[in-house]
Amino acid sequence: MSQASIALNRFGLGARADDVVPEQPVKYLLEQFDRYEARPVAIAAMPGRRQVAGELADYLIEARQLRAMSGPRRALPANRAAAMTAQSQVMMTGYNPAKIDSAADKMEGDSKDPIKQARQFAQRQGRDNYVAAVGGRALASLTGPAPFVERLVHFWANHFAVSADKLTVIGLSGLLEFEAIRPHVLGKFGDMLAAVERHPAMLLYLDQAESIGPNSPIGSRYANRPNRKLGLNENLAREILELHTLGVRTGYSQADVTELARALTGWTVAGLTNGPVARAVGVDDTPGDFVFVEQIHEPGTRTIIGKSYAQDGERQAQAVLSGLATHPATATHIATKLARHFTGDTPAPALVARLEAAFLKSGGDLPTVYRALIAAPEAWAERNSKFKSPWEWSVSVMRALDMKTVQPQAVTGLLNQLGQPIWRPGSPAGYDDINAGWAGPDAVMRRVEAAERFATRAGGSIDARALAPKLFPAAVGAATTQALARAESPGQALALLLVAPEFMRR
Amino acid sequence: MIDRRSLIGGGALGTLALFAPRIAWARAETDKRFVFIIQRGAADGLGTIAPVGDPGFAGARGPLAVDFDNAAKLDSMFALHPALAIVGGLYQRKQALFAHAIASPYRDRSHFDGQNVLETGGAGAYRLKDGWMNRMLGVIPSGEARAIAVASAVPMALRGSHEVSSYAPSSLPDASDDLLQRVTMLYEGDSQLHALWSEALNTRKLTGGLASDNGRNAAATGALAAKLLAAPAGARIAMIETGGWDTHAQQRGRLSTQLKGLDAMIGALQAGLGPLWADTMVLIATEFGRTVAVNGTGGTDHGTASSAMLLGGSVEGGRVISDWPGLGANALYDGRDLKPTMQLDAFIGGAVASHFETDPARTMMTLFPNTAPAPVVQGLLRA
């Protein structure tokens, strides 16, 4: 594989037919730091925080009013949650939009319950916002001037994964990437971490928004009511330590998790919570905005991994995060994941050590780490090629076909079919980043099916024999050249190129 | 040349049987089916098979205990979640057995590590590079050692040196035969893609028209697995992944929906297997359980011991096996979780060894090589 091909494919998102072959691959990558757009038109045109959160807040208010007017309260939460999950399953896994709508209509027809109808309406709004955001991400990936940095955005969005399978998270999931990842991808890791952990998508996904300090004013008030069990939820705290910063098995204990959960109490979202938290938050802030609510914050000094944090309201958890952001274990964790992403499943320890050193020496300055990666011979080694994830494969196909617009619904459906729905990995650990996670027989078959469909749609207008060397400069293998030459039609040749060994890996 | 008389009279029978295992008196090799359904996300065993007879249960579970007010009692201690109607029917017919207060050797609370231990069969996370189901293929009769993941990628439990395939329904249009042949030629010189592609083509042949079947819901996945297992030359071992068990908030409704899906999956699997159900064993397990107490958001957090299920035509069912540790404050693990009193490893080892009639000690050593030698759980199958 040539260095130019590696710069385009391993570091980038695959070449476009109109890309100039980078003569100085290293320089080509470094210059992208200046070209990158944190808020390109494709994303600025998406439904923003105010709209998505505003719609959700309206729904929550309406649902509360409807519940207040209707019968016994006890049965409601279970019904609500069951229907919500079923509905979001229908909504998020369906491929054919018509099918989705008919399923949703059927559910609506099944019930004249106004609460259910309101919820279904909110589900649709969330889904529409989700699909629009998927389209925005895809478009930015097709047309952006800095494909390497776009790749890094996707890397970090997967590192700080939320999964769009809760009503409140569906429409907000893309905004986490747009608002908390993109602006900081060329900044300090600690700033990205702070932005992510305060983002409504994360606070709601990992249940932080409704976590209450047991000894806080609100917590104490409800302490003796048997049917109102309120209190701490340690979900976000655990994932911060395990996934976002230090990494699993790095010397923190259950006590540290609980302590961090206590420190985090009070970090919540305006307009998008329920019950006593919603009442404590009040109505002054714009829905979706981060708020700190003293009345649910657990008072007291917290000790986390041997370090003591005096009570300081909102800033207590922030102080912990700042410490975690530059912790040596965090440096190792991040260095390992980046090295694995760009150089293969078992990255060379020496490379990890260099990235780790760059991270620590610069206080978590991400461009410094990326520069160390670009300078690493391991990243340019031919044998270190990786099987593309479904997202990487799809984007590289659309770039190869010179697509400059997308149908958001079609991209959403394609990624569902290929096994990697966007922002919906099903767990806060995000998607696997190892070859075995994606290189399966069924996965290859699906790509072949999709490739044929793409090629049919291209309608014979592209000559795959001429395209191949543009996508993989000086790196097209003999088997591929022969297959393209022998194909019975331009369309078939294109389908073969899109699943050629060069195209399946990066 | 040994004639038949000298064979019988001369005690050479055993020797010959070793060399010719397929002659008339050998047992047919391909009648056993084994399915592992993994519950990813730490399924709440206390909310699935509830210890309603434990004096601490109602108090600890509060709003989550309501589901069991009218639930079918399994015995004097346990009741089954009402969403599990089909599983409950199997229990009545003594084809379902539950194990409780059970856990893998893993004692911390990370999904990552817990699932890795559950799937690799290691004593700790990332100590083994292959999965116990893959290693199992080396101990069981060769005719039964063909495995498939009903998923688009091979999960950890099935990864390893033995070949396995994977399949998930696709609603993409079928690629044309000519393209498939050309892809075969294109991949010939690439060992990884060649192997994956051969497997994909084989599976495609087996499943016929299933590619157009929209099998994304749980029942369709069960039916699909049954179809893959029922084919004469099909798989004998299957793994199905289910996610969504991580119920940190609003557990009551979410768990109920999850269990309904699981129940439908099992119903479709059983129906699809028809008479083969008699020789089928289905194991259902999760990486760890959840806290005994309900958290501040109507859910539960990561815990330790959970429950597991064994279903099938020859399972010695109709009972919950458990050395119940109790839910009193002093009985809990770390003061918060259901305490493990049974090894999931020994349970799985017992299930596999009895189902495939393999040597229990060798089965344990192969599936769980790093676990301190432990006897398998006995008596899981009808004699």
Image: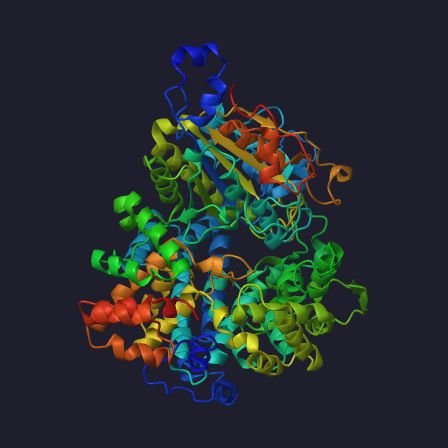
**Residue B249 image position (x, y, % from top left):** 58, 53
Does any portion of residue A271 appear in the rendered image? Answer: no
**Residue B14 image position (x, y, % from top left):** 49, 19
Give the quadrant of the N terminus of chain B.
top left
Q: Which colour scheme is used?
A: rainbow
Give the side of residue B370 with respect to residue A33, left or right.
Answer: right
Viewer-proximal residue among A81 and A253: A253
**Residue B328 image position (x, y, % from top left):** 74, 36
Which residue is located at x 72 percent, y 45 percent? Answer: B336
Does any portion of residue A106 appear in the rendered image? Answer: yes
Which residue is located at x 56 percent, y 48 percent? Answer: B251
Q: Is residue A304 above or below residue B127?
A: below
**Residue A429 image position (x, y, % from top left):** 56, 60
Residue lying farthest left?
A: A488
Viewer-proximal residue among B204 and B46: B204
Give the side of residue A64 with respect to residue A417, left or right.
Answer: right
Give the side of residue A65 with respect to residue B102, left or right.
Answer: left
Q: In this view, does A343 lie above or below A92?
A: below
Viewer-proximal residue among B58 and A16: A16
Q: How many marks?
A: 0
The quarter of the displayed image where residue A101 is located: bottom left
Viewer-proximal residue among A463 and A296: A463
Residue lying farthest front?
A: B1
The quarter of the displayed image where residue A119 is located: bottom left
